Amino acid sequence: MPTLAHYQTLKLAETNAIATISAKLDAPDLRMDDFALMVKAAELIEDVRDPVAFSALKAKIVAKAVGFYSTDLSGEDVLMLTRASRFGDIPFGGEERWLLLNRDDRNMDVSGDVMVGERTLESFGDRILETIGTEI
């Protein structure tokens, strides 16, 4: 069971990771392979406890990715840069992991209303009152 001390340690580790990745991205001699490692490291940060700092890091990654594009890149490099420039838009771990973390969101429309699956009490209308009344 996580304790407060464990939570504080995780928060400090996340803060240090974000600061280190950000500092590496600011380096003037940042190479493409180091950039790829920084993107992967940022992807591994889960359960973000400082959304403001993480949002700033995502923006920095996207801005840095734009500067690396050129016509002489390998297909692997272009794929990595495209992934970096979409950082934050694509759920990490694939769709199945995202569905595990967002239980019934596949059944929600853009406004958050349930389309199929779980239904709200209001969606049953008067029928629920009739059913409860007859079962009592």
Image (spheres, rainbow, N blue to C red):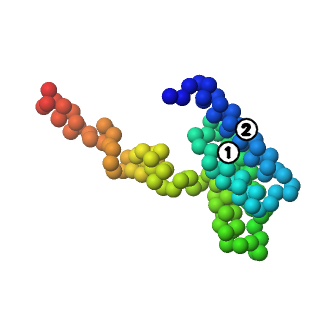
User: In the rendered view, does 44 fall on the left or right side of 135?
Assistant: right
Query: Which of the marked residues, 1 or 2, is nearer the chain's N terminus?
Result: 2
Residue situated furthest bottom in the rendering = 72
Can residue 6 be seen by looking at this rendering? Answer: yes
Residue placed most toward the observer, 42 or 53: 42
| Res 62 seen here | no
- Decide: is 45 above or below 71: above
Nearer-the-camera pick, 65 or 124: 65
Res 135 → quadrant: top left
Closer-to-camera residue (97/125): 97
Q: Is residue 83 left or right of residue 68?
A: left
Q: Position of residue 133 (x, y in %)?
A: 16, 30
Q: Which residue is mark 1?
A: 55
Screen quadrant of the C terminus = top left
The reply to whether dot 1 and dot 2 touch (C-beta < 8 Å) is no
As drawn, the label of residue 30 is none
What amino acid type is highlighted by mark number 2? Asn
- Location of mark 2 (residue): 16
Q: Nearer the viewer, mark 1 or mark 2?
A: 2
